[in-house]
Image: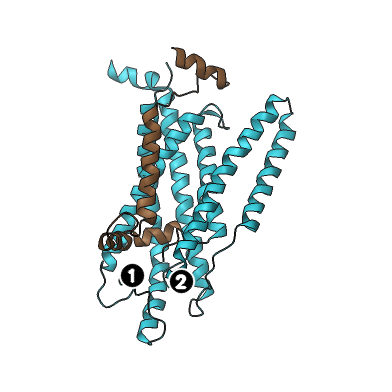
Amino acid sequence: MATAASASAAVPSTTTSVRVPLWAWALLGFAVFALYFVSQENGALLSSPAAQMLHELTHDARHALGVPCH
Amino acid sequence: MGTTFGSVLRRGVLAGVSAGVAAAVVIWLVVEPVIRRALVVEDSRSLHGGRSAPSRLPAHGGDEPLVSRAAQVVGGAVTAVLVGVAVGVIFAVVFARCRGRLPGRGDFGRSMALAAVGFAAVSLLPALKIPSNPPAVGDPATVGRRTMLYAVVLLLGVAIAIVVPVLDRRLASRGTVPSTRWAIDVAVTAALVVLVLVLVPGSPDAVPADVPASLLWDFRLASLAQLATMWLTLGLVFGLLMERADAPQRALEPVAA
């Protein structure tokens, strides 16, 4: 496996390296977006009533997570 | 055979669900009682005709709440679980990418190390600069600026978590002895954290006079307890699941046969 060989050149221990496929980074981007959505979305993407509904539903967790809420 | 990314990701999601549930329990037991105290302060304002609650967000003690308090409590718990899953996914990707470079003995040690770095960089550092506030604190007019500052500190925390290990490896490749390397790492981390805390401006809001200092302190402590619980559970569960994955053949084959 060429990828394993190239990974072992960069990483000191060959047994610990895990090949991260490209889609994993897309998934990471989606997870970051999901975090933004539940913690910060206040009308930038959603319509005003929908954003307000989301704000109120996630309200307590937003306060608890420490993100600026209002 | 090496560990596949899919198996790491599955464990990340599972650990994320556990972390989210643990965080939701802490919110329910520790944070909600403080939020109730803050809502009493908010309510007494509108009763006395003084400063009313922000009109932009009518559910805060307004006449017709958009969402009931009960729904807010349940919604908060669901949100905590969703946040746990999202953080678990990010954790798994970063863990897989950095597994060979993370300190700690075995996957359990590496998982705990990554969770500690995650807590410090994206939860503790922003909380020190822009501390969490209960309802009844926070001027809606400055929320954009506070959010921007919060995001800047969070990104700087991530940057420190990337820069210091890079420096460490560079020192290692130059043959610096571990004790010297450690001392330099700690000193550089401390210096960068102090720079962030000193140079980034703080929240522009003043805390209203009718909010007791004890309420503010209790809420900030409760908020940190919830965040620490989430990261600790994530690190513990993910680490345990990865350790179990290391010897699946030994453990499972007698059952399968």
The image position of residue B219, as x and y in percent, is 47, 65
Q: Residue at x 37, y 62 (%)?
A: A60
How many neighbours does mark 1 have within 10 angstroms: few (below 14), some (14-19), or many (20 or more)? some
Q: Chain of mark 2?
A: B
Q: Quadrant of the C terminus of chain B?
A: top left
Q: Chain of mark 1?
A: B
The residue identified by callout 2 is B137
The image position of residue B47, as x and y in percent, is 35, 85
Q: How many marks?
A: 2
Chain drawn in brown: A
Secondary structure state at the residue bearing disc 1: loop
In-front residue for pair B143/B130:
B143
Q: In front of the other: label 2 or label 1?
A: 1
On screen, residue B241 above or below B127 = above
The residue identified by callout 1 is B57
On screen, residue B136 above or below B74 = below
Q: Is residue A25 left or right of residue B161?
A: left
The image position of residue B126, as x and y in percent, is 53, 55
Q: Are marks 2 and 1 on the same chain?
A: yes
Chain drawn in cyan: B
Is residue B176 at all visible to an observer of this figure? yes
Q: Residue at x 41, y 78 (%)?
A: B41
Report the amino acid beneath label 1.
Leu
Secondary structure state at the residue bearing disc 2: loop
Q: Quadrant of the N terminus of chain B?
A: top left
